[in-house]
Every structure is written in C-alpha cells, then in structure tokens.
Image: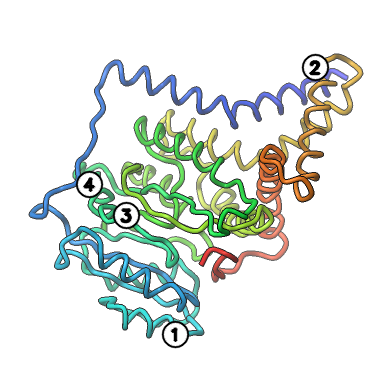
Amino acid sequence: MRSRQLAFWGSAGLLVYTQAGYGVLLAALDRLRSRHTGPVLPSPADGAALPVVSVIVAAYAEEGVIARRVANLRALDYPADRLELIVACDGSPDATAARAREAGADLVLELPRGGKIRAQDAGVRSARGQLVAFSDANALWDPDALRRLVAPFADPAVGYVCGDLRFVDGADGAGTNQEGVYWRYEMALRTLESRLRSVTGGNGAIYATRRESYFEVDPIMGHDLSFPFNMVKRGWRAVYAADARAAEKMVPSIEGEFARKRRMMSHGWPIVMRGGLLSPRGYDPLYALMIYSHRGLRYASPFLHLLTLGSSLAAWRRGRVYAVALVAQLAVLLAAGLAPVVRWRALLVARYYVLTTAALAAGLWDWLADGTEAGWEPAEGTR
C-alpha cells in the first residue's frame, strides 16, 4: 500500500507543479530578478536603422487566403525597400502560387511536396534579408508587428524572436473550443521565461531569426518546438516580443482542437525523444529547469494523470485525501463527458483539458505506430 501512496503523491505533486507551481516559481524568480536589475525593453527601430527582412510564408492549398495574407504583409508599417515577401508553395495542388503572384509577392517558389519545413528552408536559401521572418498563410499581422518583431535583435545575443498570437473565434461565437483560456496562461509563462532566460516554445504565426542563427531541422520536426532550445544550445537567446501581434482563426470545436494538437504532437514527440530537447548538454541550470518543467513534465501529463487516477483508486479507503482526489478526477471526466450535451463554460473547459491532455498521448501513439509525415493539411475551420 505504501507504494501506491508514494505513486499518488509523486504523480499528483508533479501535476500540480507543472500546471500551476511552475508559473508561481517563474513569477517569484522574476520578482527577485527585478529587484536587482530594471527591465530592458527594446523599442521599434527607426527607419534608418531597420534591417532588411525576408518574410517567408510556407503554403499548401491556400488559394482562398493567400492573397489576403500577401496584402496584409504589404500593408505593414515597414519600409518597402527593406521588406522582401516570399511565398514558398509546398506542392500546392491549387492556384496558391498564381494568387500569390497576383497579390504582389516578391518571390513565389513552386516546390515539390516536401512539407512545411523544407518549404521554409527553400525560402531562406532564396532570401536576401539580414533577418528571416515566418508566418502562416491564415495569419494576419498588426501594422507595427514587424517593427516590434525585429526590435529585440538590437541585442546581438538574440537569435530568435517569437511574437504574440491571438486566437479569434471563427465560428461567430458558436464554437466550443476553449483554447483561448490555455493560451493566455501559456503567454504569461512565455513572458516570464523570456525575461528570465529564453522561451521554451514558439508559434508558427509570427517569429524570426537571424540568417546566421537559422538552421535546418528534420522535416518532421517543426520550428515552434525545435528552434528555441536549439538556439540556447548554440549560444543564442530565444525571446518573446509580446507587442509583435498576429491573429489566427481558432479551430471551432474542442474535438477539432484535439485533432490539431494530436497532429502537432506527432511532430513534437520526435523532437522530445530523439531531437535533443531532453539532453542537458548546452543548457544552464535555469534553462534546464524551464525545459524539464514546461516541456518534459507537460508532455508527460497524460501518464501522470493515469498514475494519479490509478493510485487514488487503489488507496481511496486509506484516507480522505485519496477519496477526495478520486472524486475530483471522476468529476472532471464526467464534466468532460457532459459538455457536448450541456454547453456550460465550466464543462467545456473540462472537456478541453481532458481532450487536449489526451492528444499528447495520442500524438505519441501516432508517431510510434505509423511514423510522421512531413506534409500537413490546413486545420479545419481555420481559413
């Protein structure tokens, strides 16, 4: 029985730490740091100092949105002679390339199907910019987003900058997805990580690197997870520019979000298991703590939940705390099951949490069972 109790306290403690305690720890460390050093906030550079930037949009079957994307980038508050717009078409079966040319892209690459990463690599090889920035075809940037995205590169130690992504409800308010709740917390963690050391993850809607810090990765491994920790291993900082803002439509349903995260994690697990994320080589102690807390434990959370549920079920007669824990876990599962019938916000949040946690394990299963394809399809409802 003692082993069951140890299993419960160990797994439950790690879950509480990774979901809430890690954020509290970062906030405490940030407060301690701010007592000794004032914040250094980069400002958007003036026109004379702005670097030449190549913005690369990898696109597959995006004929419906690519013209809007090009127009949005052309309207940025950034000198036209310092902005190069490249659309890298990854074997698009439709008129994406033609629509991009008509909309005014500087360079349109028509590539064989090889996946998003290889399309981005081709874009970088063709780029003339000192910096290379990346975006999704369905994203829209604020007018000053590029100025604010490049500002942190004034620090020569910065090799990667990720901007802020806002999710917009694309279902006219009728969607069930609760991604916004999680995402706001994620952005708070990212802000603290960036101030303290470097971020542990990015997003595909708005980010940039120096030409010399860019590196090519396995085509099944996305930049969002593989770039930040590898930048740190290579001696760069990877930071978050909260004022460089982009927006994308959110997947309308929780079930659609489960499918999206499952696909993402089929690309993420190879980075975790064989891509070097868990290797401590090249990490200082603080960044190692961030990686193992925010990434390692977060991705292990489905298995920690199963261990907590199993151990509390086995020990519930041994004490009130185990019985209460068991009831709480069963209540969350029941709430998640009721959400499709009774669309209360609390029930929808419970369903979101259960399904997106399950998606982490499902992505691992997909990768181990069938491997991961380099290509991708646009998520349903996000265009």
Does label 1 or label 3 sit earlier along the sequence?
Answer: 1
Q: Mark 1 highlights which residue? A: 95
Q: Is residue 157 above or below residue 61?
A: above
Inter-mark Cα distance, 2 to 1: 60 Å
For the point 38% across and 54% down, the residue is: 246
Q: Which mark is residue 237?
A: none
Q: Mark 4 highlights which residue? A: 151
Instruction: Point out the frontmost of discs 2 and 1.
Output: 1
* C-beta proximity under 8 Å, tags 4 and 1: no
Q: Which mark is residue 321?
A: 2
Secondary structure at numbered mark 2? helix
The quadrant holding residue 322 is top right
Instruction: Point out the frontmost of discs 3 and 2.
Output: 3
Instruction: Point out the frontmost of discs 4 and 1.
Output: 1
Inter-mark Cα distance, 3 to 2: 49 Å
Secondary structure at numbered mark 4? helix
Residue toward you, 379 or 16 = 379
Inter-mark Cα distance, 3 to 4: 15 Å
Does label 2 or label 1 sit earlier along the sequence?
Answer: 1
Badge 3, how many Cα within 10 Å: few under 14, some, many 20+? some
Does label 3 or label 4 sit earlier along the sequence?
Answer: 3
Does label 4 or label 1 sit earlier along the sequence?
Answer: 1
Q: Which three-letter amino acid code belongs to the residue tagged 3?
A: Asp
Residue 107 lies, in percent from the top left, at: 28, 78
Instruction: Point out the frontmost of discs 3 and 4.
Output: 3
Badge 1, how many Cα within 10 Å: few under 14, some, many 20+? some
Q: Which three-letter amino acid code belongs to the residue tagged 4?
A: Ala
Inter-mark Cα distance, 4 to 2: 51 Å
Q: Mark 3 highlights which residue? A: 142
Q: Which three-letter amino acid code belongs to the residue tagged 2?
A: Val
Does label 3 or label 2 sit earlier along the sequence?
Answer: 3
The quadrant holding residue 181 is top right
